[in-house]
Image (cartoon, rainbow, N blue to C red):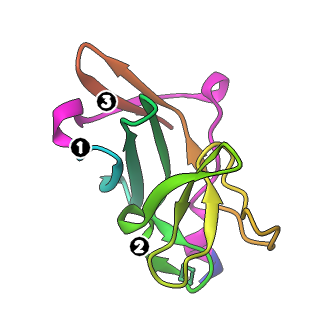
Amino acid sequence: MQDILNQYVTVTEDAVKEWFRVGETTDFPENSGACIKYKSKQIAVYNFSRTGKWYATQNLCPHKMEMVLSLGMIGDKDDIPKVACPMHKKNFSLEDGRNLAGEDLKIATYPVKIEEGNVYIGF
Ligand code: FES
């Protein structure tokens, strides 16, 4: 199980080696998540249109190793944009992936850029 988790490592914008196009902005539902595949990884992409921001994280919830985060509700907690896992409602920051209850659970995050209506995720 740890092997699956080890595939997902946070990428910061200045460490991007490849910008991978995942579709057009209109392919992604507003204020919601969608799942895309990059190599063997499942990545959740969030179109937070309420704030005009985009986020990407691993789709794998580290709590019970379920590929479900793209189905989670997005919102904010104390001004931190977050996703709530649909299984047991654990909240993760969309900015840095930390568990907002301070639990020792973290998800990988990836930068997103929008260019000419296309959505790119940085790996
Ligand atoms: S599987 Fe995500 S909170 Fe339990």
**Which is more toward the observer, 87 or 112?**
87
Relative side of 3 to 113, left or right: right
- Give the residue type at disc 1: Phe
Q: CA distance from mark 2 to mark 3?
A: 21 Å
Q: Residues within 10 Å of mark 1 (few under 14, many from 20)?
A: some
Q: Report if residue 82 lies within the magenta region.
A: no
- The number of callouts visible is 3
Q: Nearer the viewer, residue 87 or 77?
A: 77
The circle on residue 81 is none
Residue on which disc 2 sits = 68
Q: Is residue 17 above or below residue 35?
A: above
In the image, 111: left or right of 9?
A: left
Cα–Cα gap, marks 3 and 1:
9 Å
Magenta extent? 3-27
* CA gap, disc 2 and disc 1: 16 Å
Report ligand 1 position as a quadrant: bottom right
Tag 1 secondary structure: loop
Residue at disc 2, CB closer than 8 Å to ligand 1: yes
Residue type (three-letter) at the residue carrying disc 3: Val
Q: Name which of mark 2 and mark 3 comes first in the sequence.
A: 2
Q: Residue at x 30, y 55 (%)?
A: 34
> In front of the other: label 3 or label 1?
1
Measured as percent of width and height from the top left, residue 61 is found at 54, 73
Residue matched to label 1: 28
Residue identifier under label 3: 119
